[in-house]
Image: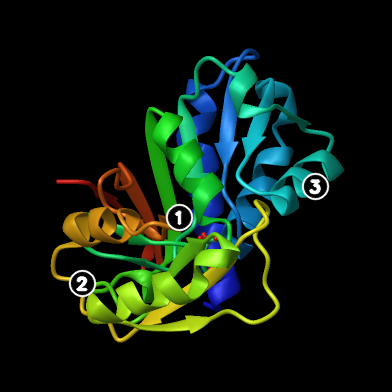
Amino acid sequence: MTQDQLKQAVAQAAVDFILPKLSDKSIVGVGTGSTANCFIDALARHKGAFDGAVASSEATAARLKSHGIAVYELNTVGDLEFYVDGADQSDERLHLIKGGGAALTREKIVAAVARTFICIADASKLVPVLGTFPLPVEVIPMARSHVARQLVKLGGDPVYREGVKTDNGNIILDVHNLHIIDPVALERDINAIVGVVTNGLFAARPADLLLLGTEHGVKALKAS
Ligand code: 5RP
């Protein structure tokens, strides 16, 4: 199976998982990236089964709208049962690295609101220890050098992501060469640096369910 086929399989598995639990009043939180795009396309085939969606990026909002799915502002939504999104890496406890698509802050906000966070990923994303994928950090532009110096003190090698501006008007530093033994502590420590908007560790609020696309079918892993 190709990586694209694995992404489509986990996207379909997520739709199959949430569909029986949706009503015509349900709003679904939707992530960003190529796997999330597969989910949007699969979900769109059932657009009569739910009310609409909250998007974690402008790109996702545009894709949802192109399918005729109503997109709501998060502030207008009371209850969000599900958030479905991809990840750059996951460990076995469903701590994630996200933000390869620079949408980490809005993704983290929607994930925080949702009662159930379903992560969908192909098997290559599951790792024993997070950090071989550079950790994205969203930073207020004027704080770039200050934040970079603090990230070096935490043991990382920050690299400015050239030519990228987030949906919030900020920049991204990708932190290389981290071996993240304690993701909860590192998420907290990086978020405490003045000028950081948020970082791509989803550890304080990990996924609740990981649907992993493998050669032998979709495996479901639950947070322990
Ligand atoms: C975007 C993200 C994505 O979920 C992550 O980059 C995975 O993307 P893809 O599904 O394309 O591999 O965090 O900010």
What amino acid does circle 1 point to?
Ile
Instruction: Please name the residue that numbered disc 2 is placed on.
Output: 180
Q: Residue at x 34, y 52 (%)?
A: 210
Residue 193's tag is none
Q: Nearer the viewer, mark 2 or mark 3?
A: 2
Between circles 2 and 1, the one closer to the viewer is 2
For marks 2 and 3, the one nearer the N-term is 3
Does ligand 1 reach within 8 Å of label 2's beta carbon?
no
In this figure, which residue is indicated by the disc labeled 3?
62
> Which residue is label 1 attached to?
120
Query: Whole-percent x and y of residue 133?
Result: 38, 79
The answer to whether mark 1 is within 8 Å of ligand 1 is yes
**Residue 216 found in image quarter:** bottom left
For the residue carrying disc 1, how many other residues have a C-alpha within 10 Å: few (<14), some (14-19), or many (20+)?
many
Q: Residues within 10 Å of mark 2 (few under 14, many from 20)?
A: some
Between the C-alphas of marks 2 and 3, the distance is 34 Å
**Percent of width and height locating residue 93:** 19, 55
Could you tell me how far apart the alpha carbons at marks 1 and 3 are, in whole angstroms? 20 Å
Q: CA distance from mark 2 to mark 1?
A: 21 Å
Mark closer to the chain start, 2 or 1: 1
Q: Say which of marks 1 and 3 sits in front.
A: 3
Q: Residue at x 58, y 69 (%)?
A: 5
**Which amino acid is tagged 2?**
Ile
Which of these two is toward me, 24 or 114? 114
Question: In the rendered structure, which disc, 1 or 3, sits on the residue that comes first in sequence?
Answer: 3
Q: In the image, residue 171 lies at what x, y percent?
A: 59, 67
